[in-house]
Image (cartoon, rainbow, N blue to C red):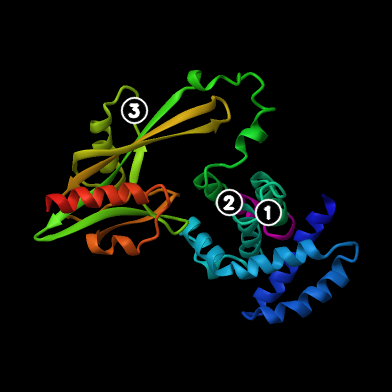
């Protein structure tokens, strides 16, 4: 929709002026909004969309900035130029918080890249596309199947039973240091603590594979104590079509040594936590029952 593209461009100009002047109070944005709409977008008949978009971005600004910092760790927020910084805020807000029936994920990314190319520097489009692309992958590439179907005309839509299977394994890792018990967790760019996990190789035994996965990702040797559960979900691949991803979760014990997180775009840190602090952490909902089961096993054996 041309009007929506114009609205996004207008919101970018408003955010640019507000940010460039070092303003932090949302009250300061209203006069900028009124003036910019009147001067640069008189053709917008309904200002509810740019007004809602602007308000949403400002309300979520702190969260959006944290995600930018984690998704582009080599670029401190104040070192990103004002245009790129605010294009990312627009793109991330629409990608993460807008109704996807109104703004599909791919539309959010493409619109942001076009804004970057139009208003930013020579490398702005590539930079914005890289950051938003990394976040898009971390949230499971929503809508990828829909936008890929036309391109995958040679890939048949196979029944569930015939879908290829991709195997993964992960673990809740714990260690003892004297009388204290610690749990090793990894932190993702969306602010959640989660389990170290990875892909199993073809034909690899699951219990041996999870030991390798943990070593590869956080750099410590572990031994498997018990399997905690399994999960399966369907994902889409642009060439292979739909894939069944099967994840096996384990409880594993290691040695309380420094963690060495493998460099990855989806994770930003790995840390040991005292067992008593686990309840204060921010987990994804599907991790909570696994963690509860693991704690029961650990404390029973303590």
Nearer-the-camera pick, 299 or 223 = 299
Read off the residue under disc 1: 112
Residue located 55% across and 32% down the image: 236
| Callout 2–callout 1 Cβ contact below 8 Å | yes
Q: Is residue 245 left or right of residue 269?
A: right
| Secondary structure found at label 3 | loop
Q: Which residue is mark 2?
A: 132
Tag 1 or tag 2, which sits nearer the N-term? 1
Report, in whole angstroms, how far the alpha carbon at label 3 lies from the one at label 1: 37 Å
Task: State which region is magenta.
Answer: 118-129
Mark 1 residue element = helix
At label 2, counting other C-alpha atoms closer than 10 Å, the crowd grade (few under 14, some 14-19, many 20 or more) is many
Other-residue count near label 1 (Cα within 10 Å), few / some / many at <14 / 14–19 / ≥20: many
Task: Tell me the residue at 72%/49% (across/down).
Answer: 102
Q: Is residue 77 above or below residue 301?
A: below
Q: Is residue 67 left or right of residue 104?
A: left
Q: Which is nearer the eye, 282 or 144?
A: 282
Disc on the earlier residue, 3 or 1: 1
């Amino acid at each position: 929709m041309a009007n929506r593209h114009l609205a996004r461009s207008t919101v970018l100009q408003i955010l640019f002026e507000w940010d460039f002047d070092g303003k932090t109070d949302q009250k300061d944005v209203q006069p900028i909004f009124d003036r910019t709409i009147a001067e640069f977008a008189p053709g917008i008949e309904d200002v509810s969309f740019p007004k809602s978009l602007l308000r949403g971005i400002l309300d979520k600004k702190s969260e959006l900035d944290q995600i930018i910092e984690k998704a582009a760790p080599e670029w401190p927020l104040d070192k990103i130029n004002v245009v790129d910084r605010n294009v990312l805020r627009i793109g991330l807000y629409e990608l993460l918080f807008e109704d996807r029936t109104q703004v599909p994920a791919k539309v959010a990314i493409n619109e942001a890249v076009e804004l970057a190319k139009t208003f930013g520097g020579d490398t702005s489009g590539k930079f914005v596309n890289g950051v938003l692309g990394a976040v898009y992958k971390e949230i499971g590439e929503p809508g990828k199947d829909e936008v890929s179907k036309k391109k995958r005309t040679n890939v048949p839509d196979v029944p569930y039973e015939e879908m290829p299977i991709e195997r993964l394994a992960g673990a809740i890792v714990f260690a003892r240091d004297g009388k204290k018990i610690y749990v090793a967790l990894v932190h993702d760019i969306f602010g959640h603590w989660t389990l170290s996990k990875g892909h199993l190789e073809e034909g690899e035994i699951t219990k041996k594979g999870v030991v390798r996965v943990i070593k590869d990702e956080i750099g410590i040797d572990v031994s498997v104590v018990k399997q905690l559960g399994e999960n399966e979900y369907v994902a889409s691949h642009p060439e292979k079509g739909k894939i069944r991803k099967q994840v096996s979760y384990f409880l594993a014990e290691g040695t309380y040594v420094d963690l060495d997180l493998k460099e990855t775009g989806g994770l930003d840190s790995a840390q040991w936590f005292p067992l008593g602090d686990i309840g204060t952490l921010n987990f994804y909902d599907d991790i909570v029952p696994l963690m509860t089961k693991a704690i029961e096993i650990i404390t029973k054996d303590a």
